[in-house]
Amino acid sequence: MQENISSKELMLKKIRKALLEKRDNPYPNLEDTPLYTENTEYPEVLFAEQLTAVSGNFIYCENGIEFIENILQLADRFNWRKIYCWEPELQELLSEYEFPFYKTDKDFDLAEVGITLCEALIARNGSVMVSNQNAAGRRLSIFPHHHIVIARTGQLVMDLKDAFKLIKDKYGNQIPSMISTITGPSRTADIEKTLVLGAHGPKELFVFLIEDFA
C-alpha cells in the first residue's frame, strides 16, 4: 500500500536522510582559497579606478601646496562659499594657506562642503572608511552636498580586513562606536529603478591622497 506523504513531509524526509549520510567535503580547501584574484596594480591605481567607477573623484597630491591648489580650483568651479572643517589638523593646513572655511557649525544648514579626515582608503572597492572618533563626528561627512576626504598614503590598504587592522592598531580596545564605509556619492534606485545620486547624502565625493602630509 502506497504511503500518503505530503510534499512537506517528503522534503523533511530527504533532509533527514541527507543529514544522516556522511559525505566527503566537496570543497576541503575553501577557507584557504583567495576570495579575489591576485592584483598586479599599485593600490593607488586600483583605488582610483574603483572610486571613479562609482562616480567618485580621486586627486593625488604630493604635498599640501598641491592640495590647496586643487581645492581652490574646485571652490571656483562649484562656487563654494559655505565650507566646513572641524578637524584641528586640517584647520591648521587650510589656515596656513589662508583658505577660508567655517570652524564651527554656525549656519550649518547652509553647508555646501564638508572637509574631513578618514580612517582608511580601501583599494579593492574604492571605499573610504570613516568613524565618529575624528573631530568631524557623524554629520560633516553626510550633510553637505559635497564631501572632501583627506588621506595619507599610509592609510591606503588593499582590503576591508586591512582597514579594520588599522582601526585596531590605532584605537586598541577603545573602538569607535560608529565605523562606516563610503563608496562613492550616496545613491538610490528606489523610484522607478532610476539611479539618483545624492539622494540621502553628498552628491559629490572627492578623495585627496596626499603623499607628504605631516
Image (cartoon, helix red, strand yellow):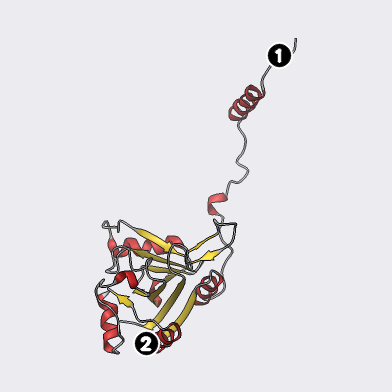
Return the x and y of residue 142 as percentages of the image width and height: 38, 65
Q: Tell me what residue is drawn at x 60 percent, y 46 percent.
A: 27
Q: Look at the numbered discs 1 and 2 and tell me whether their residues touch, using CB distance below 8 Å.
A: no
Residue 79, x across and y down, in percent: 41, 84
Instruction: Tell me the number on the disc at residue 124.
Output: none
Secondary structure beneath disc 1?
Answer: loop
Where residue 104 appears, as percent x and y from the top left, is 24, 73
Badge 2 marks a residue whose secondary structure is: helix
| Residue denoted by label 1 | 3
* Residue furthest to the top: 1
Q: Few, some or many C-alpha atoms within 10 Å of disc 1 (few <14, some 14-19, many ≥20)? A: few
Q: Which mark is residue 68?
A: 2
Label 1 and label 2: CA atoms lie apart by: 81 Å
The image quarter containing residue 130 is bottom left
Q: In the rendered image, which quarter contains the N terminus?
A: top right
Compared with 57, 193 (above or below) is above
**Label 1 is placed on what type of residue?**
Glu
| Towards the viewer: 105 or 30 | 105
Residue drawn at x 29%, y 79% is 90
Camera-near label (1 vs 2) is: 2
Q: Residues within 10 Å of mark 2 (few under 14, many from 20)?
A: some
- Quadrant location of the C terminus in the rendered image: bottom left
The residue under the point 67% across, 18% down is: 5
Left-right relation of 101 to 75:
left
71 left or right of 19 in image? left
Q: Please tell me which residue lies in front, 65 or 169.
A: 65
Check the image and name the residue furthest to the right: 1
Viewer-nearest residue: 196 or 206: 196
Q: Is residue 139 left or right of residue 122?
A: left
Write the residue at 45% across / 85% down: 77
Labels 1 and 2: the sequence-earlier one:
1
